[in-house]
Image (cartoon, helix red, strand yellow):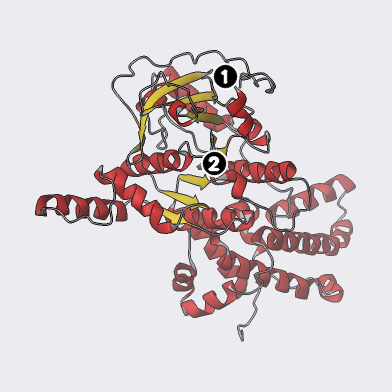
Amino acid sequence: MGLNKTYNEPKSPTAGKLGIWNTYDNALETLACRCIGEPYNFYRVDAGICPAMLGDTFHGKVVALCQAQFRSEGRYTAHTVAAMLNVPTETLTAIGQRDAEIELSAAFDFFRDIYGQFVEVQIADCVSGWVMQGKTSEEIQVLAAKFRQEKGATARQTGSDGVLEFEQQLFAALEGKQFSYPVKPHLAKMRELTPDYAPGDYIVVGALSGIGKSYYGLNTIYHNALNGVKSCYINLEMSPDAVQKRLWQMTGGARFQRDLRCGDDETRRHLDAWERVKKMGMKSHNPGRSLPAILSTIRHEWNDKGISLAVIDYAQLVNIPGYRGARNYELGEVSAEFRALALDLKICVMVLAQLKQEVMKYGDRRGGLYDIKDCANFAQDATFVHILHRPNEVLKEGEVSEFDDNYADVTNVKGRETGRAQAKCVFDPVRGFYDDDEFTQFPATPPPFSPALPGGAGRNEDLPF
C-alpha cells in the first residue's frame, strides 16, 4: 500500500535470519483485513489481542483501533476506523474485501502462532545476556515468563467462569432486587411461568405443520419490539412480503385484503399501523438455507444493530453445505451451532421446529419433549422447549372437538426451574397466538399423556431440566 512499516523496538537479529519478521508482517496484515471484513466476529478474538502484539505499523494500528472501538461502543465499521486513522474509507473498505476465504478467528490463530514464535526468538536472544549477567536458571525462567506476559504471549484467555456474574445476582437477591432481562415471552401467562429469557438462552418451539410456528415466532418478535428489543427474523419459508403482511395484521388487528378501500378514519388506521411496523426494531432476512450464511447474517445484525433476539424459521430447512453424514447428525450440528451462537453473542436464539408426524398417533396428538422431527439434539441443547397445540387443527374425519374454535395452548416441556406447565391462549390468523382473559388459572398442570393408538409408538415423557 506504499505505507512505511515502523516498529516500537529494534528487530530481533535471529528473527530476521529466520524470516519471522516477514511472516509476522504478512500475518498481521491478514488479521487487519479480516478485522475490517468481519466486525461481527471481533468478539471471538478480542480477549486474545494485546497491544504489545501490534507494534505501530499501519495494520497494527487498524487492529488496535478496531479493538478500542469494539470495547467502547460494542461495534465498529470501516468508516469509523478510517476516520480515526485519517485515511479514506475506501482504503479500509478495500482491505476488508481481501483474504475473504479466511475467517477472522483462523487469521488470528495463525497470527498468534507466528507472534508466539517471534517472542520465543526474542527470549532466546536475551538468554545469553542474562547468563552473562550471572542470572540463575530460576531467575531466567522468571524473566522469560515476565517477558511473555508483557508481550501478550501468555496462555490463551478463556471466557468468564461466572463468579462475578452470579455474585451480582446473589447480592441483588439478598437485597430483594430482581434481575429482569429485556427479552420476554409474549404471552402473559407464559411470563407468569418464565418472566424473561436470559442472554444466551436457546429456545426451541415445536409444532406440527400448519399449527402456527411462524405466527408464534413473529408474535415474540412483535411484542418484544414494542418494548424496544431489537431482533432479526431468519425467514426460510415465507415470501418477504408475507412477513410484513403478518406484522401489519398484528399491529392493526385487521386482515389484509386485496381491496382495502374504506373510509378516511380506517384508511388512516391502516397507514398508521404500517408506519409503526416500519419503525419496529426488527429486520427480516432470507439468507438461504446454508448454516454459515444464517450464522453470518445474525452476527451482522448483532454487530450493526445490537440485536438481543434472533428467530430462525425453521430448523428442518437448514443444511450444512458439503455435509455427507446422516440427516439427524447434520441437524445435531445445526442445533449445536445455534446454541453456541446464543452463548457467544449473549443473545436469545429462538428456533422453530416441526414435530414428527407420529404425534398424530397419540391419543391427544400433543407433542412431547423428544418429538422434534429428525433430531433429538434440539431438545437436549435447548434451555427452553415450548410445544404449540391447536386441538381443532388435528381432528380426524368424523371427530367432534370439545374445544372452542380458536382455542390454543403452549406447553413448556423443558425450562429453568419451571417444571412442566401449560399456558392456555387463543389463536386467529390475524393476531396469531394471544392471551384471553377467560384462562385465568396458570400455571396449569397439563393433562397426562394419553396412550398411543394401537400400533403407535409410546410417548416420550418429560425429563426434569
Work out whether residue 455 can be spotted: yes
Mark 1 Cα-neighbour bin, 10 Å: few <14, some 14–19, many ≥20? some
Q: Residue at x 73, y 58 (%)?
A: 109
Vertical relation: 43 (above or below) 407? below
Q: Position of residue 91 (x, y in %)?
A: 53, 79
Q: Is residue 178 visible?
A: no
Q: Mark 2 sits on what residue?
A: 351
Residue displayed at 17% across by 56% down: 261
What residue would you read off at disc 1? 363
Q: Nearer the viewer, mark 1 or mark 2?
A: 1
The crowding category of the residue bearing disc 2, from other C-alpha atoms within 10 Å (few below 14, some 14 to 19, many at least 20), is: many
Which amino acid, by three-letter code, is at mark 1? Gly
Q: Residue furthest bottom?
A: 2
* Residue drawn where x is 60% and y is 49% of the image: 317
Circles 1 and 2, Cβ within 8 Å, touching? The answer is no
* Up/down of 386 relative to 137, above or below: above
Q: Nearer the viewer, residue 141 or 129?
A: 141
Residue 231 % position (x, y): 43, 48
In the image, taking residue 268 as reference, residue 236 lies left or right, namely right
Q: Is residue 312 left or right of residue 459?
A: left
Whole-number angstrom distance, CA of label 1 to CA of label 2: 27 Å
SS for dot 1? loop
- Please identify the quadrant where the N terminus is shown: bottom right
- Farthest front residue? 398
411 horizontally vs 449: left or right:
left
Badge 2 amino acid: Val
Q: Residue at x 63, y 74 (%)?
A: 98
Depth check: give the residue in front, 288 or 212. Answer: 212
Image mark count: 2
- For the C terminus, give its image quadrant: top right
